[in-house]
Every structure is written in structure tokens, then in C-alpha cells.
Image (tube, rainbow, N blue to C red):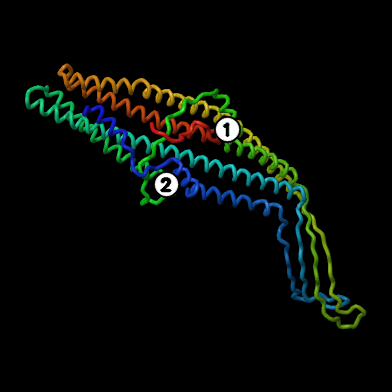
Amino acid sequence: MHHSTLLLLLLSTPPAQPLTLESVLRTAVEQSPQIRQARHQWEAAKQLKAQAVSLPDPRLSYNHYLRSIETRTGPQRWALGISQTVPEPGKLILSGRIADRDARIAYLRYEALVRNVIAEAKERFFELYYIDRARRVTQAIAQLYDRYAAVAAGEARSGQARLQESFRAESQRAQLGYDLILLEEMRQAEAEALRAVLGLAPSDSLGATAEVAEPIPFGGPVGRLQEIARMHNQELQAAGVEVERARLGVRLAKRAPIPDFTFSLNYISTGNPLLPTPDAGSDPLTVGVGISLPVWWWKFRAQSRQARHQQRAAQAGLESQQSRLRADVAKSYFQLNNASRLVQLYRETLIPQARQAMTSVEELYRTGTADLTSVLETTAAFHNFELARLRAFSDYYQHLARLEQLLGTALDARPQGGSP
């Protein structure tokens, strides 16, 4: 069997119990501790409005006279009162609207966190995807180099091969052994990172990654993607809500000096007088109303200045977020297209050429026309091209995940199945 044919058979061996992208994403959404944390923070923020629009707790007071106050109707012994402060209604309404904006911001942050976890899970999955296939390619190449090293050693003993050919075959085989150890350690590290994203225990095993479809060439103007990001990006939407919240804060600060009212009801216990009177022992009942006095004007001016600065900061944050988002989308768009071009270049041109060259040199070597050095060089070239193709393949889907993360929504150029 030709060495190139053996290599193709080794590369086509399917992994057992594959880890699919669909199962990774489902587990991430269902079990990620980051998502649970953001969900509970959102649920907590939804409780703010009920607190913001509620009246302050009423106050119940009791007073006992150490010395009774003698009145015509009798001595006053103790008093019981209840009071309720009622803020100006506009303050309550604005506070409720601000609480609504806080809950909306928390929800958008929750959505953004779900999106970020999904994107990170995809990136980790495709890093494992690259490592798994790089190991398979390297193992297949290593088996070829084992054969080449054995052939070189035999020819060296018979005087048919030069020492440098035998040395190169052995050194290449040693390098591949190191590469396999490195890839194994890389997989352990990446698997642990993926477990952290998915909320899995260290004892949960992650099988070999399943095959995905070839990347779809991505087209369309970058301006269209920037428009999608403007409409769907959760951070940008949250920045817009921050501006709304800050405007409401300015309106609330303007109403801060408006007085609040306090209404009270008091009952006084009265004993019997020394001398009988027509209304002896009658217990007085009083009502009262109070008003806050906004005399500390510097406090309210500082509050108003603070609210205006917060509004300007929120507006600047929105503009900054818009600018960064446009730039990030453009950069990610370039990286995605570049990875797509590289995949196409290696798949349609460089890999077929390297495979044809390797087959041709093997034929020439068997006929004695080419030496072992040429075989080693073409095999190394094929190995490097195949690893570069796999790297570009994984990079494509990682850049796609980052682009979808920026857009806040999914694109159609996603893996649906197949083999690379």
C-alpha cells in the first residue's frame, strides 16, 4: 500500500462518541453558572419598581408624660400617634420609570451574557476541533515517518542511504512526538476551559469533536452588518437605555426641592379631673399636616449638576459604544473573510498540489529516481499545509462566533454537518 493511501485512510477514521456543537450550546444555555447569575440579577432588578413607587413606611409613636399635664378635662397621661409621609407624586412616578429602565438594562445584560457564553462555547469547541484533527493528522504523519526512519536505517546499514537522510527522518519523528505531547496538553487545557464555560464538573469527559460543514464563503457589504449590529447588539441597546435613565434622573433632580407632606393622627389619654366638669375625662383626638422645608439649596443644586453630568456621560458612552461596535464589526468581518479565503486556498489548491507532489515523489523514490530527502520534504509540506488548513477552518468559525457576538444575532453561515 502506498504511503499516501495509508495517510488518507488514517485521516478518514471517524472519532467515537463525538462531541457535537449542538450539545455544547444546549449545555451552555442550560447549565452555565454565568447565565444563572445574570438571570437572577435580572429577576432582582425587576423588583426595584415596587420599592421605588411605594410610600415610606408610616410611623407609630407613643409618648408617656412623666408629669401629667393638668387640663380642665383632666390630666393627660400618654399619647399615641401615627403619621404618613407622602412624597410629591411626580417623584414617585419618575422613580418608577427609572426602576423600569434599571430592569430593562439588567435584562439586556442578561441577554448579552447568554450571547457571550454561546460565543465562548463555540470558540472553545472549535479550538478543540482543531486540536483533535491536528492530533489525527500528526499521528498519521508520525506513522509515515516511522516507516521512513526504518527505511532510512535499513538503507544506511546497506550503504544505500546517506547519513543525513537517516538523521533527518529520526529528527522529524522526534519533533512529531513532541508535537503530539504538546497537542495532548493543549487539549487538556482547552477541555478544562470548555467545562468551565458549560458548568461541568472536572470528572465530566469531553469526547472527540464531531465533524462540521465546510465554511460557506461569506459575502455582503460590511455596512449591512454594521446596521444589523446597530439594531441588535445588546450592549448598544443597554447604552441607549442608560441615556433614557439619565434623562429621567435629570427630571427627578429638578423635582427634588418640591416639598413632601406628612399627615398625622394623634390620640391623647386623659384621666378624670379633680373637679367634675361636663366633659371630664374626654380624650382629645388631633390631626396634623407637615411639610418639608427645602432650605439646603446647595444640596439640590449639587444633585441637579450630578444628574446633568451623568446624562452627558451616558450620551458619551452611547456614542463611544457605537464607534467601537462599527470598528469591531469591520475588523471581525475582515478576519472572517480572510479565514474563508485561506480555507479555500488550502482546500482547492495547496493541499491537492501537496498530495500530488507527495504521491509523485513516492513513485520516483520506488523507482530510484528520487532520494529519501525529497520524500521527507514533500511529506513535511503536506503536513504543514494540512495543519494550516485546519487552523484556518477553525479560525473561520471562531471569527464567525465573534462576529455574531458583536451583531447580537446569528448569521446563516453556520455549521450544519458534513466533514471538512
Q: Nearer the viewer, residue 354 or 187?
A: 354
Q: Is residue 60 left or right of residue 358?
A: right
Question: Residue 312: where, in percent of width, then height?
Answer: 65, 35
Q: Which residue is mark 1?
A: 321
Amino acid type assigned to the residue bearing label 1 in the image: Gln
Q: Secondary structure at mark 1?
A: helix
The image quadrant of residue 81 is: bottom right
Vertical order, 330 against 100 (above or below) = above
Farthest residue, direction front: 1
Tell me the quadrant of the picture where the C terminus can be found.
Answer: top left
Residues at circles 1 and 2 in contact by the CB criterion of under 8 Å: no
Q: Residue at x 58, y 48 (%)?
A: 42
Q: How many C-alpha atoms fall within 10 Å of the one at disc 1: few (<14), some, or many (≥20)?
A: some
Q: Secondary structure at mark 2?
A: helix
Vertical order, 38 against 318 (above or below) = below
Q: CA distance from mark 1 to mark 2?
A: 29 Å
Q: Earlier in the sequence, mark 1 or mark 2?
A: 2
Q: Residue at x 80, y 68 (%)?
A: 266
Q: In the rendered picture of this protein, how many numbered marks are placed on residues?
A: 2
Question: Residue 72: where, in percent of width, then height?
Answer: 88, 76
Amino acid type assigned to the residue bearing label 2 in the image: Ala
Farthest residue, direction right: 278
Question: Residue 400: where, in percent of width, then height?
Answer: 47, 32
Q: Which residue is mark 2?
A: 196
Vertical order, 194 against 364 (above or below) = below
Question: Residue 255: where, in percent of width, then height?
Answer: 75, 45
Vertical order, 339 against 73 (above or below) = above
Tell me the quadrant of the picture where the N terminus can be found.
Answer: top left
The image quadrant of residue 58 is: bottom right
The image quadrant of residue 82 is: bottom right
The mark closer to the camera, 1 or 2, is 2
